[in-house]
Amino acid sequence: MKNTLQNMHGERFEREFNGELFKINKLEQIKALLLCLCVTFLNISCLREPNVKTNRAGIWFDSPAQNWNEAIPIGNGTLGGMVYGGVESDTIKINEETLWSGGPRDLQNYEAIKHLPKIRQLLNDDKTKEAERLINSTMLGEYNECYMPMGDLVINTNSQEKAENYIRQLDLETGLVNINYSIGGVQYKKEVFSSYPDKVIVVKFTSSKKGQLNFSTSLTSLLNHQVSVDGNQVILKGNAPKHAYPHYLGEKPPVYEEGHGMRFQMNLLVRNKGGQVNKNNKELVVENADEVDLILTAATSFNGFDKNSVTQGKDYESISNQKISELRNVDYAELKENHISDYSELYSRVKLNLGESEAANLPINQRIKKYKPGTDPGLTTLYFNFGRYLLISSSRQAKHAQPAHLQGIWSRLLKPAWSANWTLNCNAQINYWGVEITNLSELHLPLIELTKELTVDGARTAKNMYGAGGWIAHHNADIWRTTSPVGGNGLWAIYQVGSAWLCHHLWEHYEFTLDKKYLTEVYPVLKGAAMFYMDNLQRDQDGFWVTNPSESFENHFRKPDGTIGWACVGATQDMQIIRDLFQNCRQAIRVLENDSEFDVKLEGYLKELLPMRISPTTGRLQEWKDDWESAYANSGQLAHGWGLAVGSQITPRGTPELAEAFIKTLEHRKPWEQNECGSWTGSFAAKFWARLENGEMLQKVFDNHFSWAVFPNLTSNFRGLWEIDGNLGIMASIAEMLLQSHSGEIVLLPALPRKYPTGEVKGLCARNGFEVDIKWEDNELTKAVIFSKQGENCKVRYKEKIIELDIKKGGSHSLFLDDYK
C-alpha cells in the first residue's frame, strides 16, 4: 500500500512502508485532534490519580527541582524557560534569545598586521616560543559579550501542607510540561509550554475542587530593573549591562552606564475563572480561583547586530504590550492547540525505537544514576528524542533569530560558562551536526544567517589583520558578530578556520535540500571565505600552501627536542577544513554553472594544499605538519579527526590507510575516556566511531557519556558546567549509527551496536533529497524504504553490497535483506 505523507515544504508525496496507509492533510488534522483529546484525558486522569506512571515518551520526576540541573527546559526559539515545579514556591527562569550585554563596537586590531610577517618568519625558523609571545602580545583582542538571563517568573502558594503523589513531567511528543500533586485530598495541576506560533510562555493552573487556587505571582531579574502592576498584569522593565566579563576572569561585576545596555520588558498577564485577583505592591494575588492562566510575553530593543539597541533599538515596550493585548482574550485551549500543532509537526517527522526498558518506570534522575553499560536501550532513544526537543526549542526561524549557542537558549547566570557564546572551533557547529539527518532542515537557518552576518565584520578583519580579501571568523562570536581574535591566549584565539567550518554547514544544507535558489544566495559567502584563504595561505619549505600562524584545536605539541608549544604552521585540521571549503565551492560552481575562472583558481590551490600525513614512527595520523607528539595526549581533543567526523576526507572504504592511521590515533589518545566524555569530547568520540562503522566502540562512548556526563534533567554535563552540545552531538551519532550518506552512498545500519538487536527508525534524511525508513531484527536489516523528494539517483549500501536506484521525484523503493544476499 502507498503512504501519503507531507514533507516540510507542504508538498504531498507517497511512499510504501509496513503496508500501512497514512495521509498527512485531513488525516493528520484528525490525528492532531485525537492527540489533544488523549492529552486531555490523560490530564484528567492525572488529576484523579497523580501517581499514575508517566508517558514513556518523555522525562519525569517525583519531586520539584532543587536546582537548575533538575529543572525542565522549555523554549520556542525566542523565549526559553527552566521549569522548577515547586509547590510552596515555584520558579520559571526566563531567557530571551537576543538579550546580551554590550552593543556594536569596533574591535578591529589595526596593529597586528605590522607584526604578522615577523610571526610567520619566527614559525618558519622553528622559533616557537618567540612566535607565541609575539602572537599573544600583538594579535589578540577583547572577549565576547555575555548572554544575559532575563528574569524569573515566581509563584508562591505559601502552603504549609505537604504535597503527595507528586509528578513533574515533560511530554516530548507534545512539548508540554505537566506538574501534578495533591494536598488535603485536592488534586492540583500546572501545565506549562512555550509557544512558537504565539511567542509566549503559558502556565495553566487547575484543581479538582473549585475555589482552591490561592497564590501570588511576580517577576524579578538579576539585571537592573523596575517592576510595576497594571490591572491584572505584572510588568518588568530592565536593561542589560554595557559590558559583562566572562566567568573565567573571576569576580568582576557587570558594567552599567547611563545610555548603554540593551532594554527589555516582560509582561505577565493573570487570567482567572472564579475567585479574584488583587494587587499587593509589586505582585498579583490570586484568591479562591477555579482556574488561572499565566501568559508571559517579552521583548528586547535588539534591532540587529549592527545597530545600537538604545539609540536605534526596537520599541520593545510596544512589542511586548501589543503581544499581551492580542492574546488577552485568546482561549487557553487555542493557545495549547497552536503550540502542539506546530511543535508536533517537527517532532513527529522522525520516530525511533531501539527497544523498551523497564528503567522507563523510574524518574529520570534515578534512571540516570542507576544506568549501567549494556542496560536500558530505551535511554538511547530517549536521549535522541530529547536532543531533537532541545534543538526545536532553541533554534527556530524568525527575524533576528539566533542559533542555539553553548547553552542552547537557557542561562541563569550573569557570567555564564564561556559567555554562552558561539564557540566556532567546534561547539556551535556540533549543535547542528544532526539537524539535517533528523529531518529538521529549516532549524539550520539561524546558524546560516549567523554565518552571513559574520561576513560584514569578517571582511574588515581579513583586511585589517591579514591584508587579505574575503572574510574570516576566528574562535568566538556573540550577537554583535565581531570576528577578531578574542583575549587570553593565541592557543584558542587565533583559530583561523571558524569561517570555513561554518561554510561547511552552508554546503550541507544544500546537499540535503538541493535548493538551488538557496545555494545562489549563499555562494558569495562561500566564495568570500575561500578568497580569504587564497590570499592568506603561505608557502612552507616544501612548497605547500599552509596556514601561518596556526594552532590545533587548543592542543599542545611536543617536539623531538622536548619543546612544548602550540603555535605552528599548517595544522592538519586547518588544512582539512580549507580543503573541504575549496571542494564545496567547486561543487557549487558546477551546480550554478557560473564563476568558471574562480573554479580554475580553486583547482590550482587544491593541488598544492598541504596533504594529511601518517607518522612514519607511530603509524598514527599526524595532527601537525611535522611528526610531533601531543604534549597532553589525554586532553580529549583530536582536531585532525575533523576530516572523518565532519568532512568526508577520511572514510573506511575511500581512504582505508588514513582511516587505519586515525584508528591508531584513537587507540592511543582514547578521547571517550577524557573530560567525563561530556560536551565536545563525547560528541567527537561518538562521531569518530560512527563514521568508522564500529558500533561496539560507539556504544562504549554512549555508555561513558550516560554514566559520567548527564545531569539529572538529562542535559549534558561538562565538568560541572551546563552545555547542550553534548546532547546534540550524541544525538547526531545515534542517527548516524543507523544511516550515513556523506561518502556518496546511502549506508544502512553502518554502526549498529549489538545492544539494539531489533528496532526501527522512520524519517531520517540522506543527502540529495532522500528520506529513509529502516527496520531490523537480530541485528540484520529486514526492510528499508527510500523515498525521493527530488528524483535523484542513489546508491544504497548494506554491508558490502551496493544497490543502485533510480527513483522518480515523489516515489519510493523498498529494499529487503534478500536484496543484499
Image (tube, helix red, strand yellow):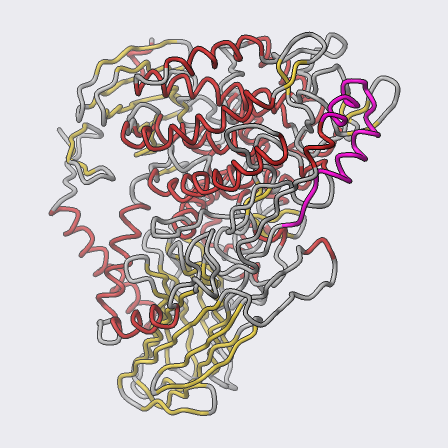
* Residue depicted at 22% across the width and 30% down the height: 18
User: Does the segment drawn in magenta span residue 128?
Assistant: yes
Range of residues picked out in magenta: 117-143
* Residue depicted at 50% across the width and 84% down the height: 161
Relative horizontal placement of residue 269, taking residue 384 as reference (left or right): left
| Percent coordinates x, y for residue 236 in the rendering | 46, 77
Relative height, residue 469 to residue 293 (above, below): above
Q: Quadrant of residue 316?
A: bottom left
Relative height, residue 160 to residue 506 (above, below): below
Q: Quadrant of the C terminus?
A: top left
Looking at the picture, tell me which residue is in the foreground, 658 or 578: 578
Looking at the picture, tell me which residue is in the foreground, 68 or 780: 68
Tell me if residue 643 can be seen: no
| Percent coordinates x, y for residue 809 in the rendering | 18, 23
Tell me if residue 92 can be seen: yes
| Percent coordinates x, y for residue 218 in the rendering | 46, 80
Relative horizontal placement of residue 165, taking residue 66 as reference (left or right): left
Relative horizontal placement of residue 450, taking residue 33 as reference (left or right): right
Q: Looking at the magenta stretch, what is its main secondary structure?
A: helix
Relative height, residue 328 to residue 362 (above, below): below
Q: Quadrant of the N terminus?
A: top left
Q: Quadrant of residue 49?
A: bottom left
* Residue depicted at 57% across the width and 30% down the height: 497
| Percent coordinates x, y for residue 72 in the rendering | 47, 60
User: Does the segment drawn in magenta span residue 262?
Assistant: no
Relative horizontal placement of residue 787, taking residue 621 as reference (left or right): left
Task: Return the residue found at the far left.
Answer: 26
Looking at the picture, tell me which residue is in the foreground, 15 or 405: 405
